[in-house]
Amino acid sequence: MTLDDAQLAAQLISLRDCLRWATSEFNVQRLHFGHGTASAWDEAVALVLGALHLPWDVDPAVLDARLLDVERARIVALVRARIETRKPLPYLLGEAFFAGQPFTVDERVLIPRSPIAELIEHDFAAWFPDAPPARILDLCTGSGCIGIASALHMPTAEVDLADVSPEALAVAKINVTRHEVGDRVRAVLADLFDGLEGQRYDLIVANPPYVDARDLAGMPAEFRHEPALALGAGADGLDIVRRLLREARGHLNDDGVLIVEVGNSDRHLEAAYPEVPFLWLEFERGGHGVFALTAGELDEHAASFV
């Protein structure tokens, strides 16, 4: 017998019931997970807790709590939408977590998921052991998650959020207000460094578009809801990164550091610049394709970037 959504919701009595059912549905429908979760179970947990406005570390005793009719209906509707639209869950919930903080997101911005969060949580101490960087640039900021999380973890830092997309900056400004950091964080419309003339930073962090043409063509449906401007960057994924490497030194202080995420295009980058000593970073929670270069290294290899 096939149940309609109302009949189905009536049978999902507890939070535990909803988790089990959602996990089964996600497995049957073969959804792709890559926007903050890694499995059908993790996705079900994120959906159900998000729908009920419960924290990730909720007391497990809540699993057996009876749900209200309106709550069960909301969960069923979200599961249906996740399956039928293939929209990533953070877009359906309007929120994503990054570096332990909630950020407002919608389809104007990439969903936060960078491993750079781990560096933020440690105040970039590998490069700034004595004191955190005073001025930080979050380049290609999108939702503003990297720059705002940096400001929250390093309360003495001043941060610029730069993006070429006015739509993305509108979301970033929402998050600046949400986290009450407007006294130290500003959003700037800039095409990479065009729009940041005369500005210098101790740390430039960038998560630019870096997906190569082959990976872009093969992406699961979930990724096609994200802004194309934030993903693709030419045949080898390096169209933006090449320009970034050429121009970054002019905006770094002499003891500054550049940190850039290039994901799977790391192999293209090493092939393009075999003489450059990219420091590829390792992360406890997984992730790859993030490099660091000091201002001195950018100076030493400036001829390679011309």
Image: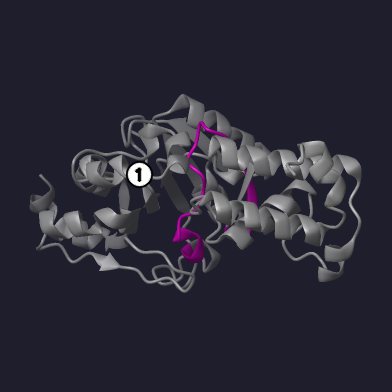
Given residues 113 and 300, the one toward you in this image is 113
Q: How many marks?
A: 1
Residue 142 versus residue 259: which sits nearer the camera?
A: 142
Asked whether residue 36 is drawn in magenta, I would say no
Determine if the magenta segment contains residue 100: yes
What range is drawn magenta here? 99-119
Q: Residue furthest front?
A: 1
Q: Position of residue 104 (x, y in %)?
A: 63, 40
Q: Residues within 10 Å of mark 1 (few under 14, many from 20)?
A: many
Q: Quadrant of the N terminus?
A: top right
Q: Is residue 213 left or right of residue 139?
A: left
Judged left or right of residue 103, residue 247 is left
Quadrant that contains the C terminus: top left
- Residue depicted at x 87% and y 54%: 13
Disc 1 target residue: 208
> Mainly helix, strand or loop, the magenta region?
loop
On the image, the x and y values in percent for residue 303 come to 8, 51
141, 25: nearer the viewer: 25
Front one among 205 and 224: 224
The local secondary structure at tag 1 comes to: loop
